[in-house]
């Protein structure tokens, strides 16, 4: 059972899905470095980990990595606010990060 779980790690986000994500939010499918692309990827991973934690409440390692991811995304969002407020507003609106 445990070994089967290890084989499924990272398969929720395939190479094609990542390229599509970067094409939609970045400058192109191969452009993984833009802040918008990174934020979109982190948001995808955060929602996946959140779903995982709803089923596995005591998985503290995943909880820790979720908190770290949220911090990384926050840092990138802060960077974007300083660099270009319009890009920040656009990505927040696109991803629905603010309520």
Image (spheres, rainbow, N blue to C red):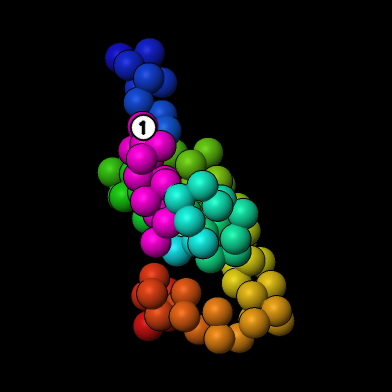
Q: Nearer the viewer, residue 76 or 16?
A: 16
Give above or below for 22 relative to 11: below
Badge 1 is on which residue?
Answer: 11
Q: Quadrant of the N terminus?
A: top left
Identified at 36% across, 32% down, the residue is 11
Q: Quadrant of the C terminus?
A: bottom left
Q: Position of residue 48 (x, y in %)?
A: 36, 49
Q: From where the camera sits, is residue 60 visible?
A: no
Q: Secondary structure at mark 1?
A: loop
Q: Which residues are magenta?
A: 11-24
Identified at 60% across, 64% down, the residue is 35
- Our reading of the magenta stretch's main secondary structure is helix
Residue 81, picture quadrant: bottom right
Q: Tell me: 74 left or right of 17.
A: right
Identified at 51% across, 62% down, the residue is 27
Q: Position of residue 60 (x, y in %)?
A: 50, 41
Q: Nearer the viewer, residue 25 or 7?
A: 25
Q: Tell me: 68 left or right of 56.
A: right
Residue 15, picture quadrant: top left
Give above or below for 38 relative to 81: above
Residue 77, picture quadrant: bottom right
């Amino acid at each position: 059972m445990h070994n089967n779980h290890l084989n499924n790690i990272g398969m929720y986000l395939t190479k094609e899905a990542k390229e599509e994500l970067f094409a939609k939010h970045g400058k192109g499918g191969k452009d993984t470095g833009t802040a918008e692309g990174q934020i979109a990827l982190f948001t995808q991973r955060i929602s996946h980990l959140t779903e995982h934690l709803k089923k596995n409440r005591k998985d503290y390692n995943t909880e820790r990595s979720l908190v770290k991811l949220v911090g990384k995304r926050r840092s990138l969002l802060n960077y974007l606010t300083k660099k270009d407020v319009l890009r920040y507003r656009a990505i927040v609106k696109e991803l629905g990060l603010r309520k």
